[in-house]
Image (tube, grey):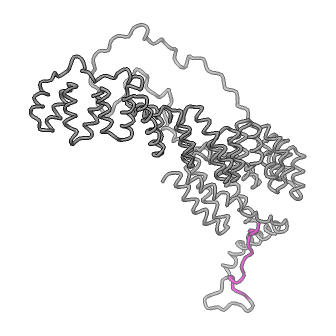
Amino acid sequence: MGPGQRVIAELSVLEKALSKNDFTAEKGPLEAIVRSLRTMNLKSLEDLDLNTRGRLITTLLRVQRQSKPALPEAGAEAAAPEAGASTEAAPAEAPAAEGAAPAEGAAPAEGSAPAEAAPAKPAVDPAKEKYDGWVDVMSLVGRVWRAAGDADRSQAAFALSGREPTPEPAAPAREERAERPPRGDRPERGERRDRGERGERPPRGERPERGTAGERRDRPPRSERPERGERPPRGERPERAPMPELTGDWKEQATQLEGMGRTRDAARLHERNNSFADATRLFEAGGDLKSALRTALSGQDNDAARRLVGTLPAEQIGPTLEKAGAYELLMEHYVAKADFENVARLYERARQFDQAGLAYERANKLTLARKAYERARDLVSANRIRGLEVKALVERGDRLGAATLLVAVGQRREAVEVLSPLPPPKAFHFMQRLTLEDEAKELAQRELARAEQEQKPAGRARWLELLGDLTAAAETWTQAGRKDKALPLYEKLGGEHLPRAAQLAEELQQRDKAIALYTQLNDSAGLERAKALPEAPATPPAGSQPEAADDAESAASPTENASSAGEQESQ
């Protein structure tokens, strides 16, 4: 079982003790959790896996929220030693009572009660025991937070317990090596030690002699070397003065601590009793600005919090305020930095989507702004932002993206207007990709009529092919002298058009294609003619190269042009 699994197992035991409000039973699992976490060497809570971290934070916060037992009165504490004295006297009288035991069968004297009938008074006050148990538990919670790498929560838990954090015990040292004999009793370096039962080592080949650079210089015997001077003793670290005995209620004790110069101890006392204003003042006087900010936020003193936020490094302000839940100050911080994207995220967390849309718009995040307006059901603003998105996409050259955005909300006419400036084949294929079939067909028919009017057979053939009229397209390609374009169309039509495809392949001297087609038609005469064709014609026959008129349109097919342009447009 790994350390994380042991932590989860001990958390289950701790939750059972927590349900009974038994402070004594809570100590054992807390100590076990401290031991498991120390072996993991955590730098922060984020190093734990998600399940263990969630269980640990939830359970520890529940333990930390337990009600603080009432502090026992001074009279009750003074009564405890007297009770202890009475119990200590009882064992001294016990031997005499044993020696004066009555004989067997003798009746006890009248008026005397059995020894079991007189119970001894408790030696420990239950109220004090419960209070001490609560203090121990809070101190252990602080140790758990410290072992988990959360210094802020650890300090808060130690302040709650009223105890100073103690250093964790060092890890157990390795086993010491076996004692070695004194240097004087060891054999000389040159002597061979007795190998015992291992026997003698077999002789090796002769080693080459060392050069002068490898020779070892002579060193004087150890006894003749000068002795080192004694190391000066290390100065003892001054121990921290123990907490002085304080009198009166907590306010008087805090005043006494402040008078002694222990401002942070006084601040913790004020914080423990929800006197956040004085705690902030004393923490700030003691130089603990992070704790001062925490108490200012707990006391909702925004003026002091704003002043203290300015003392933090810029990279720590956001995480510190978010961890403390001071979203109002966090909003002010982001606005001052003109970080409107994070401002919008805060509004989204508060489900104020209309304000989030405005913030995203100021951050020039148009897509996020439109989605925020849509969640706020502000259709007017959403349409306005969509218009800005379309304009930005068109300026960037992404007309396909702009048309996609318009088609998604049913604005088909506007999408066609966006695609209209593109070359007709490219616009036709974009319309087909956006399922604008009627609009694409209308565009194709319009371009076909224009090609017929301008007497461009190649352009007419292309639009017939795009409209799916392959027979007319193949005939038009043949009339235009582009047999190489007509051949694949006749082959695709099949059936009665295969003889025409075989004839065109023979005329274009495409030997392999002609052989395959004549074989499929079982035309032996045509097969013989195809086999007689040269395998690789030196010059392509007439009708296999694009004419000058076709170059004006495009030598490549419209499908290839449109698909490649569509890829560039979509990017």
Task: Establish if 258 lies above or below 551.
Answer: below
Residue 460 screen position, x and y as percent: 38, 33
Task: Establish if 306 lies above or below 54.
Answer: above
Left or right: 477, with 156 as reference point: left
Residue 465 screen position, x and y as percent: 36, 37
Residue 491 screen position, x and y as percent: 24, 37
Q: Main secondary structure of the magenta part?
A: loop
Residue 443 belongs to the span the image colors magenta: no
Picture mark count: 0
Q: Which residue lies furthest to the front in this view?
A: 453
Task: Give whichever of 571, 286 is nearer the camera.
Answer: 571
Q: Which residue lies furthest to the top in this view?
A: 212
Left or right: 45, with 451 as reference point: right
Residue at 85% of width from left, 41% of height from top?
Answer: 285
Task: Give whichever of 108, 154 is nearer the camera.
Answer: 154
Q: Is residue 262 shown to the viewer in this render?
A: no
Task: Establish if 92 lies above or below 296.
Answer: below
Q: Give the range drawn in magenta.
A: 112-127
Q: Which image quarter: residue 523?
A: top left
Q: Which image quarter: residue 501?
A: top left
Residue 120 belongs to the span the image colors magenta: yes
Q: Is residue 521 shown to the viewer in this render?
A: yes
Residue at 63% of width from left, 64% of height from top?
Answer: 25
Task: Give whichever of 170, 209 is nearer the camera.
Answer: 170
Residue 302 screen position, x and y as percent: 83, 47
Residue at 42% of width from left, 11% of height from top?
Answer: 214
